Image (cartoon, grey):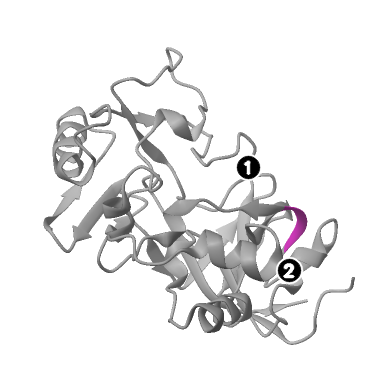
């Protein structure tokens, strides 16, 4: 399938701490063979995590994640990549700033997150960073691309407006037919100055049922996807094959 005409970047989002904060940005500079910039730089391991020393990439089950706590999905973020600082907000927590690479701030971050993590799960224990490796759910550097039209169609099927932040995507494209992105596997697309190759669909989990404004499970997105399309895929992963600047409103071709 050829790339649908008329697509534009509607939103760019990064998540400096895995599963703990989303941050819309106006632009980003993609690097060949790298994940989205300043995305999943840190992750918070729980007390039962099995990690190497020094840490390397590890599966998501070793970390705090939205599947385990809907409350985490309501964390929003502002960050300063150069300073290595993040400011986190939540409806039921005070807004605070952290430099996760600083041991004292890492301990404060864990304390800040602890009330948002279920008491019956292994407690937050350690902030992890792996230089040069994004702590995404995949052990390879991929960027996630989602369609605003697909979100609108799913919202209409469910009878409610769904926030894009339920899906923790990096790039949102408007102007494509709904779910057309799933037909682009193996195709190359150009966004702004960058070029990406679409690699695979994104299989979703129950974390998408959590409302990012309230931190409450209030929508059965998994059942809606299965009922409408016969699968739980939503969005696609792509690999950066030529780096460059991308920005909101850039054409996708």
User: On the rendered structure, is 105 left or right of 155?
Assistant: left
Residue that sits furthest to the left in the current view: 94
Which residue is drawn at the image coordinates 23% and 41% (left, top)?
A: 117
Give the residue pinned by disc 2: 181
Q: Is residue 65 above or below residue 173?
A: above
Give the residue pinned by disc 1: 141
Magenta-colored segment: predominant secondary structure? strand
User: On the rendered structure, is 23 left or right of 241?
Assistant: left
Which residue is drawn at the image coordinates 31% and 46% (left, top)?
A: 69
Q: Is residue 139 above or below residue 1?
A: above
Q: Position of residue 98 (x, y in %)?
A: 20, 45
- Judging depth in this view, the residue of 70 and 167 nearest the camera is 70
Magenta span of residues: 195-200
User: On the rendered structure, is 169 left or right of 179?
Assistant: left
- Judging depth in this view, the residue of 165 and 67 nearest the camera is 67
For the question of whether residue 77 can be seen, the reply is no
User: On the rendered structure, is 125 left or right of 186?
Assistant: left
Give me the C-alpha separation between circle 1 and circle 2. Answer: 19 Å
Q: Is residue 145 above or below residue 133?
A: below
Quarter of the image where the C terminus is located: bottom right
């Amino acid at each position: 399938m050829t790339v649908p005409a008329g697509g534009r970047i509607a939103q760019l989002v990064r998540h400096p701490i895995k599963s703990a904060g989303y941050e819309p940005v106006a632009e980003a500079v993609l690097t060949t063979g790298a994940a989205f910039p300043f995305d999943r730089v840190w992750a918070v391991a729980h007390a039962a995590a099995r990690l190497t020393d020094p840490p390397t990439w590890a599966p998501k089950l070793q970390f705090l994640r939205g599947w385990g706590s809907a409350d985490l999905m309501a964390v929003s973020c502002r960050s300063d990549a150069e300073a290595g600082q993040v400011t986190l907000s939540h409806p039921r927590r005070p807004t605070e700033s952290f430099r996760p690479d600083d041991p004292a701030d890492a301990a404060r971050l864990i304390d800040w997150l602890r009330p948002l993590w279920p008491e019956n799960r292994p407690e937050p224990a350690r902030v992890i960073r792996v230089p040069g490796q994004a702590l995404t759910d995949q052990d390879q550097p991929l960027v996630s691309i989602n369609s605003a039209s697909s979100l609108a169609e799913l919202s209409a099927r469910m009878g409610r407006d769904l926030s894009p932040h339920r899906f923790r995507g990096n790039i949102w494209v408007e102007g494509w037919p709904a779910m057309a992105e799933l037909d682009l596997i193996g195709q190359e697309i150009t966004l702004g100055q960058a070029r990406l190759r679409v690699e695979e669909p994104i299989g979703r989990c129950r974390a998408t049922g959590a409302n990012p404004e309230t931190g409450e499970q209030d929508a059965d997105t998994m059942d809606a996807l299965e009922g409408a399309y016969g699968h739980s895929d939503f969005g696609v992963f792509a690999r950066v094959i030529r780096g460059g600047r991308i920005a909101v409103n850039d054409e996708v071709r």
